[in-house]
Amino acid sequence: MSEDRAVDVVVVGAGQAGLSAAYHLRRTGMDFVVLDHAPAPGGAWQFRWPSLTYGKVNGMHSLPGMELTGADPSRPSSEVVAGYFRAYEERFALPVRRPVDVRAVREGEGGRLRVETSDGTWSARAVISATGTWDRPFRPHYPGQDTFLGEQPHTVRYPGPEYFAGKRVVVVGGGISATQHLLELAPYAAATRWVTRREPVFREGPFGEEEGRAAVALVDTRVRDGLPPRSVVSVTGLPLNDAIRAGLADGTLDRHPMFARITPEGVEWADGSRFDADVILWATGFRPALEHLRPLGLREPGGGVRMEDTKVVRDPRVHLVGYGPSASTIGANRAGRSAVRDIRALLGEAPSPSSSPSPSPSPSPSPSPSPVAVPAPAASLAPGPAPATV
Ligand SMILES: Cc1cc2nc3c(=O)[nH]c(=O)nc-3n(C[C@H](O)[C@H](O)[C@H](O)COP(=O)(O)OP(=O)(O)OC[C@H]3O[C@@H](n4cnc5c(N)ncnc54)[C@H](O)[C@@H]3O)c2cc1C
């Protein structure tokens, strides 16, 4: 195997969290690399189903230093965000290498961390792990699951509403994905049944900064206690928008409690009632993708990783961004900044005088965040630091 390549910081993952960290690392002058195992820019967004249009996402925040504006709400969010991330990486000349799978991070020599990848090894003074959750879809187990004669896709492979034409579909899960799937596929399906573990909580009115902070604080407390995080959405409730109101009124979102078992033909409740089904669609969420950190033994007895802000308490060289309280686009932005500030202090790096990384190819500092419009099929940018309006 080749020699370790040495850098100050390895960032694992080039989604919103990894790119935010990379942006701030650029400002410090530290030597770093971003490793991502996806084939193209876009983080997990590039894999989201085509019917999840940009207009349907639940509030997407721009990355620091370059606004995403003017995107057509009817375009798939996968295209819009992938185009935006590509433009962002280019504008700030971020050193992203892909596809590179990070397989393990372990103790290296001289107090450094050794990062083992599908493309050789790196030696780093600190690691920012920004690997999201998309690679770890979660599917609970129910008795009889293996006997079911139909299909059991997960949100991660949601094929779009037309696929369910004429089928009887059980949708499992109480999150935004479940409600969006139901509202989309119900007009095509022969019948639908929505089941959730807990009674869904619908949120009336706007979700302001104060509510956001309170929700994030709840997840943050769990993480500080070394418990597995809950998703931010699980503590914010479901936004009661027009589509949801209509679904509640026409019975599409008529929620049932969880079934007790799965049979070859469908699902069955404890009282013996049944729903015959062709498909059970598991919209049951995701778990943090942290396997590469296993050799460092970061987990607490409670099953989570104890954190202070983005720093792992057991190993301050390791930061998790986009994890737990920062698992949203706005949270990921803040986490990237915070992780870099902490790492700079840990490594004793002097603060950089510039206020933002130089956009490529111009070496001059960027002015205030520059808007970029994202036309189909991908983002395009005017050269230089001037705001790009297309
Ligand atoms: C269906 C869905 C809808 C959402 N909608 C919204 C919304 O409307 N608004 C909002 O604010 N948030 C939303 N979120 C949450 C939001 O997408 C993320 O929290 C946010 O984008 C932060 O992304 P991230 O960088 O942490 O992760 P990701 O975008 O998942 O990026 C992680 C990156 O790490 C890479 N990676 C993973 N493991 C490895 C490895 N071992 N080696 C190398 N690379 C690796 C992946 O390839 C990926 O590119 C949604 C999430 C889901 C699942």
Image (cartoon, helix red, strand yellow):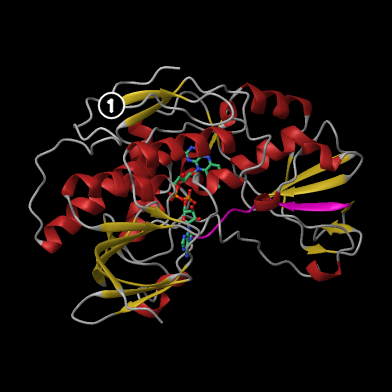
Q: Residue at x 86, y 69 (%)?
A: 147
Q: Amino acid at mark 1?
A: Pro
The answer to whether residue 138 is magenta is no
Considering the numbered disc 1 on the image, is that residue within a helix, a strand or a loop? loop
The N terminus sits in image quarter: bottom left
Query: Does 181 sit left or right of 213 as displayed?
Result: right
Tell me which residue sits at (32%, 66%) in the image: 306
324 left or right, relative to 309:
right
Q: Residue at x 38, y 36 (%)?
A: 212
Q: Position of residue 106 (x, y in %)?
A: 34, 78
Q: Is residue 21 visible?
A: yes
Residue 12 placement: quadrant: bottom left
User: x, y (%) of residue 82?
Assistant: 52, 39
The correct choice, above or below, for 7 with respect to 384 in the image is: below
Provide the residue span drawn in magenta. Answer: 277-288
Q: Which residue is mark 1?
A: 385
Is residue 285 one of those drawn in magenta?
yes
Of residues 146 and 33, which is closer to you in this image? 33
